[in-house]
Image: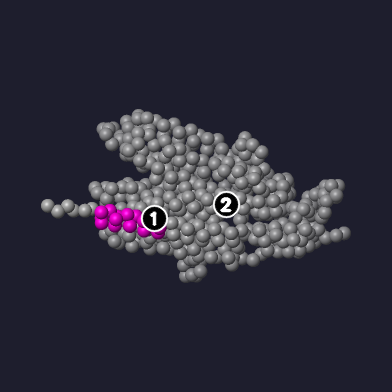
């Protein structure tokens, strides 16, 4: 009887593995290169640099938590920012940190061999992961990375998944909108395994792993609550201006889902005939709600297991409810957490056996075609947004700060009117400015009760500041606004415009008008 060698089969498998590793490395390097170029051309805006300044000017961890009272965000991102901000006042260090987090997330996704390479490639170049999370240096990328790591590190072969529990606890400390997804993911990961051999499902929570999970998540949530709970004198710019019910706010947030995640929202504005179906700031058109529900249905068709499908739909429900009770009018970056839930649902699918748990609602080929179509839209807009940074900056803060330096005005007393102060302070690497909105001096905003974006700079207030500056032998004041001041106001304040950075920017509040005192 002849011996049958298995070497050719092994060699073929090794060759395929090698090709797969090379393909992943090429995709990862392409992502690293393109993201690096995009970040290099990205001008950070006030929300990004607000977090950097809080970390920079906190002399201890205790002071950091004190400074976070008015932010409404858990502390983990700010704790990480203590490292680059205390090495250098240059905010580029924050961009480097977020860049490293994005590269790690991309590598984790590319390492999931159960997903086809084209799916992994489109995921990492999606609008959410490549642009709003990868390019904009905020806590969103950190949240998505920790949630992804929690899922991929879980194994039903371990008695206790300590690492997965740790990642979930840390994810709770990244962002308020990451908390419900972290709890849902914990339920989906740990409950099925805990209840597999029990008659009563919740008795499974009596094992060591479930006890550790429960204690750690409750402790992490309590810490997050103590960090984000608003103080009695907090001013909340998103609250109270328009009084609507939670149900109304829920429908408004739901109506924007289709244009926030499934179809690139800003591109729709380029087609005037679509403007009538776009959700308004305070209205939820029935057609927009129907489109959002349709898109959720399509997402359910794409996913192949009931487990992943339910996870995603419940995540959408709790996230939209969280929008309704907090910010009311979610922006694109907020809907990014729902895209993160879809990513996690895909990973749950990839880790589920093909049988008997696969329950396709469509033929596999049709489901895959829908997935590729959806992700292609995401990736196309992600790359489009990156290319747009070359010709249309996100903010004019960097250009304005550079001009102030070149004009030798960066050391003059600066008064900020409006909501664009932290970006200027960060790029100037300056200790503080005077904020007219709160009649106070500092580097970052503190949203106390006396805060008012509309608070104008009056002649009396400017005269008082001039008296203080003259007593300190300082040069004339520089006044920076995000809106052009009317001529009568210029005359009453005795100031003149010296420079404006009013070119079209991605963030509408990041235009800068610079004024200087008229010599008398």
Q: What's the residue at 55%, 65% (across, down)?
A: 388
- Give the residue at the far left of this rendering: 1
Question: Is disc 2 surrounded by few (<14), some (14 to 19) or many (20+) residues within 10 Å?
Answer: some
Q: Residue at x 70, y 59 (%)?
A: 402
Is residue 21 shown in magenta? yes
Q: Position of residue 8 (x, y in %)?
A: 25, 56
N-terminal-most mark, 1 or 2: 1
x, y percent for residue 174: 52, 43
The majority secondary structure of the magenta stretch comes to helix
Residue at 28% across, 36% down: 196
Q: Which mark is residue 96?
A: 2
The one nearer the camera, 392 or 56, is 56
Residue found at x 33% / y 39%? 156
For the residue pair 13 and 329, the one nearer the viewer reads as 13
SS of the residue at dot 2?
helix
Residue at the disc numbered 1? 21
Q: Nearer the viewer, residue 307 or 280?
A: 307
Q: Estimate the x, y position of residue 325 in percent, counting from the top left.
A: 50, 45
Q: 179 above or below 31? A: above
x, y (%) of residue 256? 46, 57
Q: Residue furthest right?
A: 520
Taking 457 as reference, is 314 left or right? left
Q: What is the span of residues highlighted in magenta in the rendered image?
A: 7-23
Write down the quadrant of residue 231 in the picture.
Answer: top right
Residue 204 appears in the rendering: yes
Work out whether residue 303 can be spotted. no
Q: Secondary structure at mark 1?
A: helix
Label 1, residues with CA under 10 Å away: few <14, some 14-19, many ≥20: some
Q: Which mark is residue 426?
A: none
488 or 305: which is nearer to us? 305
């Amino acid at each position: 009887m002849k011996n049958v060698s298995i070497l050719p089969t092994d060699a073929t498998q090794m060759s395929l593995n090698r090709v797969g590793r090379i393909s992943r490395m090429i995709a990862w390097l392409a992502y690293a290169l393109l993201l690096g170029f995009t970040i290099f051309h990205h001008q950070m805006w006030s929300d990004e640099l607000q977090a950097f300044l809080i970390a920079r000017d906190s002399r201890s961890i205790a002071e950091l938590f004190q400074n976070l009272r008015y932010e409404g965000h858990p502390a983990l991102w700010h704790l990480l920012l203590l490292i680059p901000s205390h090495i250098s006042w240059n905010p580029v260090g924050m961009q480097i940190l977020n860049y490293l987090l994005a590269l790690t997330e991309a590598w984790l996704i590319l390492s999931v061999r159960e997903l086809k390479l084209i799916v992994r490639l489109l995921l990492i170049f999606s609008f959410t992961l490549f642009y709003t999370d990868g390019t904009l240096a905020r806590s969103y990328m950190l949240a998505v990375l920790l949630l992804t790591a929690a899922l991929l590190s879980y194994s039903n072969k371990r008695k206790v998944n300590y690492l997965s529990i740790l990642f979930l606890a840390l994810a709770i400390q990244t962002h308020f909108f990451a908390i419900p997804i972290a709890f849902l993911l914990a339920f989906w990961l740990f409950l099925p395994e805990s209840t597999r051999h029990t008659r009563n499902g919740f008795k499974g929570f009596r094992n060591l792993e479930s006890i550790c999970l429960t204690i750690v998540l409750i402790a992490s949530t309590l810490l997050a609550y103590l960090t984000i709970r608003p103080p009695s004198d907090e001013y909340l710019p998103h609250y109270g201006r328009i009084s609507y019910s939670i149900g109304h706010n829920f429908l408004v947030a739901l109506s924007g889902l289709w244009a926030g995640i499934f179809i690139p929202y800003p591109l729709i504005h380029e087609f005037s005939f679509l403007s009538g179906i776009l959700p308004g700031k305070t209205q939820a058109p029935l057609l927009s709600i129907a489109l959002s529900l349709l898109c959720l249905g399509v997402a359910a068709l794409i996913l192949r297991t009931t487990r992943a499908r339910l996870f995603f739909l419940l995540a959408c429900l709790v996230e939209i409810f969280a929008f309704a009770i907090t910010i009311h009018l979610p922006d694109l970056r907020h809907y990014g957490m729902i895209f993160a839930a879809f990513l996690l649902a895909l990973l749950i699918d990839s880790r589920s056996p093909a049988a008997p748990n696969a329950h396709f609602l469509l033929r596999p080929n049709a489901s895959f075609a829908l997935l590729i179509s959806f992700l292609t839209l995401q990736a196309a807009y992600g790359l489009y947004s990156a290319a747009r940074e070359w010709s249309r900056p996100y903010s004019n803060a960097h250009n304005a700060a550079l001009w102030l330096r070149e004009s030798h005005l960066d050391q003059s007393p600066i008064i900020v009117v409006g909501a664009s102060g932290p970006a200027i302070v960060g790029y100037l690497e300056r200790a503080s400015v005077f904020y007219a909105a709160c009649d106070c001096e500092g580097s970052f905003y503190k949203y106390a009760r006396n805060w008012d974006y509309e608070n104008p700079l009056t002649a009396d207030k400017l005269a008082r500041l001039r008296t203080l500056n003259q007593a300190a032998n300082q040069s004339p004041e520089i006044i920076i606004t995000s809106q052009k001041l009317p001529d009568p106001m210029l005359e009453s304040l005795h100031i003149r415009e010296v420079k404006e950075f009013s070119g079209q920017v991605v963030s509408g509040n990041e235009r800068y008008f610079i004024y200087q005192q008229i010599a008398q």
